[in-house]
Amino acid sequence: MKLFLAVVCLAVAASAVEIGVPSQENPVFGYHQNFGIAEAARIKKAEEETSPSAQRIVGGSVTDISNVPYQAGLVIQVLVIFQSVCGGSIISHNRIVTAAHCNWDGSITANSFTVVLGSNFLFSGGNRITTRDVVMHPNWTPTTAANDIAVLRISSVTFTNVIQPIALPSGNELNNDFVNWNAIASGYGLTADGANIGTTQRVSSVVLPVISNAQCATVFGPWVHNSNICTSGAGGKGTCSGDSGGPLAVDSNNRRVLIGVTSYGAAAGCQIGLPAAFARTTSYVSWLQSHVTIQYVRTCIIVPILSVYGLYICRLIRFKTNTYKLNMLLQLSQSINFSIMKLLVGAVCFALTVVVSALEIPPAHANTVFGYHLQYGIPEARRIRNSELLKISGGQVQDVKDIPYQAGIIVTIMSFFTSVCGATIISSTRLLTAAHCHFDGMFTAQYFTVVLGSNALFTGGLRIDTRDVVLHPNWNPTTIANDIAVIRVNQFKFTPSIMPIALPSGNELTNNFVGWYAQASGYGITFQGGTIVDDQPISSVIVPVISNNECRLAFGNYILDTIICTSGRSGKGTCAGDSGGPVVVRSNNRPIVEKPVHDRMKIALVLISVCVIAIGAENPLQNGVYDYHRRIGIPTAFKIKLREREAIEKNEDRIVGGSSTTTLSVPYQAGIIIRINIISNSVCGGALISDIRVLTAAHCYNDGNNVAQSFQVILGSNFLFSGGTRIDTTSIAIFPGYNPWIAANDVAVLRIDKVNFSLQIQPIILPSGSELNSNFVGSTALASGYGITRDGDSVNLLQTISSVNLQVISNSECGNSYGHVIQNHHLCTSGAGGVGICGGDTGGPLVTTFNNRRILIGIGSFTATAGCQAGLPSGFSRVTSFVPWIHTI
């Protein structure tokens, strides 16, 4: 009976959440699930917390609602506990035009709308009106994005300077295609793919050129209808997540006219230069003016699920018909008497709530195996399949031929939900995995789909369904004891991509492997909060095995003798989706995976909880690249600005261990003041490489936690906050492989207005010819910058730019301090004697004399968490690795 109750309620929930197959090419279908809900959470969190700001509309700028008084924001309630977001346009005292997919996206139907008028912010301020009265175009088709327009009816609103209607096209405008006109798009949405949203985030806008439908169809094909209008995405500009339903307007006949309603963009992202598509308003003027209103009465009951989640099961009674139909949310074909449906589901879920309430669920922080599927596996499966960033935490992309024993498992639960795990091939009919992948204390898997020989989890390779799983007889999900299982499958053939791995034998059976380096692999995410890319590649990481006593410091009594642990230092380890996968060492010239041969045997199986500990563990780059602005840049900017304003006569140096200099000595040095939000500035350095380009560090723009709004580049000045030539810019190109978590490819180019060269403003030469093949080890190089001189140091008035000579060391020597973080594209200098770069210097130049000329060989990237004076190396991006890319910018 308990199983029946659970099946019924979870089936109802799943039918609401998992209905339909989202098209990866059509961002309208499944909009709420794929974009809107997540976007609402990000915006709301940002407006409630104190985090840095970023503009929303991609490539645009912050505006004031008084400049776009017709702009409406929509906070949309879906599935009772979730919120999604859209935009809209005021067209009368009581009507808002928006996109139809904001109400029904083909998968989820909105419960209600909160219309926000006259506010710069989406979740606070302004005039806020709740409504359920929405009329979608009768021919709206989410699978083809045709006729994506709707009207919201609200209680009458009074117009003010910040709440004004926008005109609909009329007269000759009805026949105008507006091609080559410049139009204004506005909204509360994102400014960049994956960008953060700040507390003081205001509505923003961007000017976009209208393009022909024929040009648009070269990208979107049959989804471009005569009733669409498109704008160019050149320069990475356009609308983005959260802007749907918002206005596209032009100035015509001395008034602002609505010519489009934001419908969709490219599934590949907002910044890739592809067009954005809108519903062409001229095609719908007659319909908009017809005052069509279909009234609905929505009858709902709440379905509690695990006393945590809740869903409304709703039925719409349409006054224009006498037949009762269930809401599209349920996607059931047959008619059911709703009174009976309420009684049945209410009784079932009440019983389920009683059953579930009797369970004692351990706290999430205590045991992340119990309830694994609900907490991690199911969301992770959705993230992998819906395709968003990548791989195992701190690791690198791997080809399955390099780890042919790796298997993926797609776990089906209750017919509706999909979870993910890893596994290890140990024979042609058996695989080893974690017991919690089959039974996590809450859910039991219905069956496994075993994926072999594939670099991607949801596509390719050999795929075998099985229900034959043998759990260790003493598996206990509440204590994580004996977390191991064997999967039995039909016999398969070995290939270069599908091979078994050896199990421990002989002396290996008594080896605890402490101090050994092991390789973990899997299809999971790369860092806490990370996302997953399409065709998510398998990846791996090298981690040291630690003693169980050391491991107990983090996990306490959960660490039994049958557990083996790896270190999470440097943010490396396994993460969401890697559970059940292999941890391998090389012994006796062969790779082996550990499995329990007897009860005392060590187990090398992935525990999901390692991800949290890995991120929280010591990371030598923590104060260097990730979260740079909050930790270093903003406080350093404050110190520099304060001391440049105070009348202190004593002068101290900035660069650690260096001496004061002037821009005559380093005329290529640029200072960068970075606007993070309205109240916060950060600082970095840069190197002038032409009259319109400055090379700097990518983390000066996006440090993984904060995104810069704008930059002020300072040239030819000994001081950062006064004097010199000062150029404002928002134009920046980030190296496409940049990763702030591991300081990879930390290079960016700022584009500035053309500057005139002088004795104090000169470009630095980039390496060329034979210099491109030099590693510069043993060379003396000059680092310069406006930063502080020592850990915790204050900055004094009249503080001039400073510099220091540093010795270039080999990457292998640098790796002794930073481990696998050091890649070929890094260059390091010795910190012996407590010299190096420090807070505020990153992004700045490292220059050496080669072939009788000064050339730029490094861009400041990171220093050690232990401090600038700890004697540890300074890390730079090796310019020779990026010269070809720099020349394309």
Image: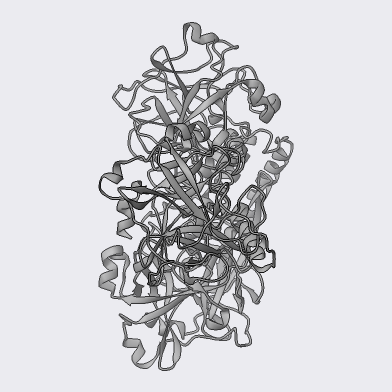
Q: Is residue 652 above or below residue 821?
A: below
Question: x, y (%) of residue 34?
Answer: 48, 55
Q: Say which quadrant the C terminus sits in.
A: bottom left
- Counting every numbered tag in the picture gives 0
Residue under the point 50% across and 17% down: 594
Find residue 754 and report its horizontal and vertical position in percent: 37, 72
Quadrant for residue 664, please give it: bottom left
Asked which quadrant contains residue 53, the reply is bottom right
Front position in the image: 109 or 504: 504
Colour setting: one colour
Q: Is residue 81 visible?
A: no
Residue at horizontal 45%, vertical 49%?
782
Coordinates of residue 342 in the picture (x, y in percent): 64, 54
Q: Is residue 847 something that shows in the picture?
A: yes
Residue 480 horizontal/vertical position (percent) = 63, 26
Image: 563 above or below 41? above
Q: Quadrant of residue 132?
A: bottom right
Q: Nearer the viewer, residue 469 or 686?
A: 686
Q: Residue furthest top?
A: 506
